[in-house]
Image (tube, rainbow, N blue to C red):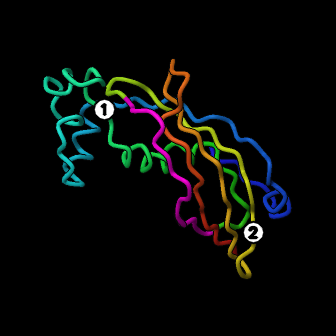
Amino acid sequence: MASIVTLEEFRNAAGRELAPSSWLDITQERVQMFADATDDQQFIHVDPVKAAATPFGGTIAHGYLTLSLLVRLNQEFALVPEGRTMTINYGADKVRFVAPVPVGSRIRSKQKILEVTQRSPGYWLIRTAVTVEIENSAKPAMLAEVLYLHIVK
């Protein structure tokens, strides 16, 4: 559950590490729905038989599926200022897909707040370093810096 904090606490949150999200199952159905939505039907994502013959040993999630799941993963323990009326995805920097996410695995996100900046009155930009972990893997799936714009009344 997101943590609602005072604006002062939010403003001074740089350096704070947030609790990791819950684990999320990466199913073939989820990967197929993403493939259908994006028209990315490459066999390594959608054909388990053909993908089994690759170095991956089976189908893998799209990198951009992993990136898009940050909305679900990061909101669980996000830091939110009191009086927020909405939050907008503001972008991502330094995104790297470090390791493939096998279908049938589970992922979670870990976040560290890097910076909180007031862009204009009532508009607060938060930059967070995110690591997406694969359960039982020493190598992360993804590293990124993500930005969210909180609008506060």
> Residue 33 occupies which quadrant of the picture?
top left
The residue that appears at 71% across and 67% down in the rendered structure is: 83
> Residue 106 occupies which quadrant of the picture?
top left
Which region is colored magenta?
85-101
* Residue 108 drawn at (x, y percent): 53, 33
Q: What residue type is labelled 2?
A: Thr
The residue that appears at 20% across and 21% down in the rendered structure is: 52
> Residue 55 occupies which quadrant of the picture?
top left
Q: In which quarter of the image is the N terminus?
A: top right
Q: In which quarter of the image is the C terminus?
A: bottom right
**Residue 62 highlighted magenta (yes or no):** no
Estimate how packed mark 1 is, as few (under 14), some (14 to 19) or many (20 or more) residues with alpha carbons within 10 Å: many
**Residue 97 highlighted magenta (yes or no):** yes
The residue that appears at 81% across and 62% down in the rendered structure is: 11
- Element under disc 2: strand
Residue hosting label 1: 60
* Residue 138 drawn at (x, y percent): 55, 22
* Residue 53 drawn at (x, y percent): 19, 21
Going by the image, does 121 lie left or right of 53? right
Q: What residue type is labelled 1?
A: Ile
Q: Which residue lies furthest to the front in this view?
A: 55
Residue 117: image tag: 2
Whether 94 is drawn above or below 77: the answer is below
